[in-house]
Amino acid sequence: MNISALQKERANYQPKLPKSLKGAVKLVEGDKTESVADPKEIEKLFPNTYGMPLITFEQGDNGAQSAPVNVGVILSGGQAPGGHNVISGIFDGIKKIHSESKLYGFLGGPGGLVDHKYMELTAEIIDEYRNTGGFDIIGSGRTKLEEEAQFDKGLEIANDLNLNALVIIGGDDSNTNACVLAEYYAQKNTGVQVIGCPKTIDGDLKNEMIETSFGFDTATKVYSELIGNIQRDANSAKKYWHFIKLMGRSASHIGLECSLKTQPNITLISEEVAAKQQTLSEIVEYMAGAVSQRADNGENFGVALIPEGLIEFIPEMKILIAELNDLLAEGTESEKEFKMLRKSHRLEWVASHLTEDSAKVFKSLPSGIATQLTLDRDPHGNVQVSLIETEKLLGEMVKEKLGQLKKEGKFSGKFSTQYHFFGYEGRCAAPSNFDADYCYSLGYTASVLIAEGKTGYMASVRNLTAPAEEWVAGGVPVTMMMNMEKRHGHMKPVIQKALVELEGAPYKYFVSKRGEWALGTHYIYPGPIQYFGPTEVCDQPTETLKLEKA
Ligand code: FBP
């Protein structure tokens, strides 16, 4: 295989481990745990895995000789930098337990377990992927492991391969399903343990015990590099407003982190929009206000960050999307009628079938966006919110607003836009030192939890703003993170998704600064991720973590 000079050099990087994992490990059990909410319901659903204690690892005196362990690993959902290091951490961990331990990778995500598609991950294969980005070692997928028939198929292959455990590397939903699987295997006395690992660039799988999900650090560093470069271009040419949409699903953690790193003129936070019940026109007014005030200072340029999920948090858009989902639901009479119409008549027809308020909002949208709302639909017929070009929607609406202000003599500047969407370019970047170390430590932690016979736990590595040596490794019962939520009309036990907290330090700091950043030009240019060099350049955790832990 041809590899880049950087990849060659990175292959030699030895990820740092907390000192408790470097030699013999002693397991310390803490207090019994309770779920974050709805304890009675969760306990009833998870009789075998509820209430287990928190686990912390400490340096032990001597390593007891153990038998080989066989482990299957699954990558679930969207890519996140560092997944390969979780796998190499598991590999090194189980080999340390016993040189005859084996690691199998299920191919293409959870579907690989159900369809019995797997490969053995040998030392040679693992070495090729150490410290690289991507999930290509075994591939990932979005099949949901939810049904008993799938669990039973999984058990067949686990028995064939003589697996002691499965490690599921995924986000909140995948780890919820990992916990359901752990409970099912425990109930049936199968002897197959299930351990989860917290992955997602979105940063929305975190809580008291999981300080951050892996991949968030690298992805936000990549986006911040690009935002910084654009800011410098904007400040050089002084003629464009750049509207940048950032990936991250519902939560605005990515936007907030990038904002803290680069100090752009405008950053929208979906959670704030929802809390204040801001309407689309209020958001547009706020943005147009910033553009116009900068223009008064002769600065007809700027940068605005827009979170991917924004549109779902704007109250009237949420209602409109729900109405469109009903109106155009797959197989309904109304959908058939819609499909029969000439394209030029469709928007008018849709507007006439909405409630008065939603029709008004629908008609106020630029026609390109209105069309996207009616055409881009997922296999269930729902609007694909992540495909909606919110950055263009806002850019066009701000332009219209500024046009009005101009007529009223309230705006005399210029407004030209450039649009960007940053998402995929950050998901498979070579992991930062932080993610390389964190992921390797998570994988290694998972192997120790397995050796200790644990199931229904998520690997946890904490104290992440300290040097890696001082990180605290252990395990958190997944049931501890659960509550009951309505999903597809039914109450289900799920891991609580972490949105941006409006009482949290990162958001509060941003609010204290955003006025200054909007009017002045206080850009920060973070530059590319550095893998070699001084620790203050190469080993920094996210601003979010630093503020949360301050
Ligand atoms: P996960 O929650 O699976 O980690 O997804 C991360 C993510 O990158 C989101 O930010 C984004 O909305 C989504 O995946 C895009 O999904 P796809 O890769 O299927 O286009």
Image (cartoon, rainbow, N blue to C red):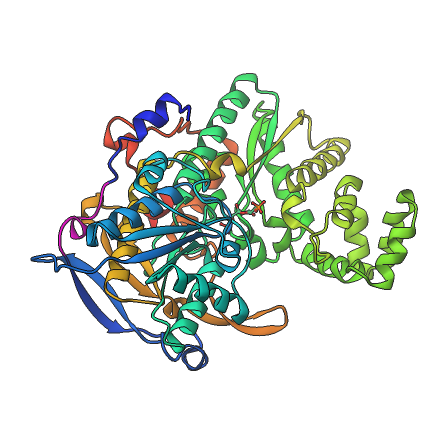
**Residue 211, how many percent across, how many down?**
34, 54
Front position in the image: 87 or 214? 87
Q: Can residue 546 be spotted in the picture? A: no
Residue plotted at (46% across, 37% down): 428
Eyeballing the image, is 379 above or below 419? below
In the image shown, does 456 or 73 lie closer to the viewer? 73
In the shown orientation, is residue 546 left or right of residue 318? left
Query: Which is more toward the observer, 410 or 15?
Result: 15
Q: Quadrant of residue 209?
A: bottom left
The answer to whether 528 is drawn above or below residue 382 in the figure is above
* Residue 150 is at least partly visible in this image: yes
Relative to residue 179, is residue 394 drawn left or right? right
x then y, percent, for residue 531: 31, 29
**What predominant SS class does the magenta segment belong to?**
loop
Q: Is residue 17 magenta?
A: yes
Q: Residue at x 20, y 50 (%)?
A: 96
Write the start and end of the magenta stretch as one range: 16-24
Where 538 falls versus 275 (above or below)?
A: above
